[in-house]
Amino acid sequence: LRFFAEAGPLHLARWGSGLSESGFANPKFVAFHENLIRNGFEQGQIDLIRLSSGQQVLGYFYNFCFDGVVYFYLSGLVSEADGKRKPGLCGHTMAIQHYLDKGYHYYDFMGGDERYKANLAQCRDELFQLSLQKDRWHLRIENFLRTVKNRLGY
């Protein structure tokens, strides 16, 4: 829980403090994940890693573990002034080796097109998103307005 809490400000600094930017901006998100960590950590379903160099913390990785697979969920990384320093890339590389040493057979970066995922991954799956909703008049109006908005390029 401490690692999760310490990852929050780093994640907010990277992705933004708006509700649509970082989950850490949403108290319900934070409470949900704190509960998930409390209930899943001891069973080995949740893993949090702190990456550091000496006494300096470089970042945190929050992963789900299930059936021999590690699912990377999020990270909180320090901002580096020197673009050649890559704590995320270094951390993922070390985490992958750590999990291989523990007997896991796959490290899944899950969704996203970030360059580091393409650099480290050996294969890539497509991610599909599906939304289901009841047939209600106000939802039809919302869907129509969303379609108009998207066609207008907003």
Image (spheres, rainbow, N blue to C red):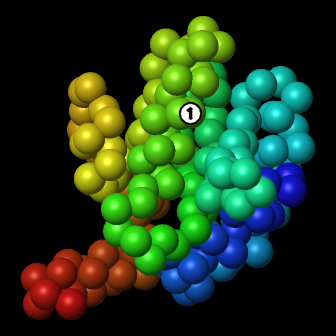
Q: Nearer the viewer, residue 18 or 2?
A: 2
In the displayed structure, would residue 110 be above or below residue 24? above
Identify the residue shown where x is 63% and y is 35%. Answer: 64
Residue 151 place in picture, x, y as percent: 10, 83
Between 74 and 92, the one nearer to me in the picture: 92
Q: Which residue is mark 1?
A: 95
Instruction: Indicate the quadrant where residue 29 lies.
Output: bottom right
Closer to the camera in the image, 112 or 119: 119
The residue furthest top is: 103
At 13% from the left edge and 87% from the top edge, which residue is drawn? 153
- Left or right for 124, reference 94: left
Which quadrant holds the C terminus?
Answer: bottom left
Q: Is disc 1 placed on a helix, strand or loop?
A: helix
Any part of residue 19 in sight: no
- Counting from the top left corner in percent of width and height, residue 12 is at 60, 77
Q: Is residue 24 above or below residue 72?
A: below
Residue 150 percent coordinates (x, y):
18, 81
Q: Residues within 10 Å of mark 1 (few under 14, many from 20)?
A: some
Residue sticking out furthest to the front: 54
Tell me if 140 is positioned left or right of 70 in this view: left
Q: What amino acid type is highlighted by mark number 1?
A: Ala
Identify the image quadrant of residue 56: bottom right
Residue nearest the observer in this picture, 135 or 43: 43
In the picture, residue 10 is in which quadrant? Answer: bottom right
Q: Is residue 95 left or right of residue 111?
A: right
Q: Which residue is at 86% across, 56% downward?
A: 2
- The answer to whether residue 3 shows anywhere in this view is yes
Give residue 85's position: percent from left, percent from top. 42, 60
Please name the residue shown 30% across and 76% down the image.
Answer: 143
Please count the marks in the image: 1
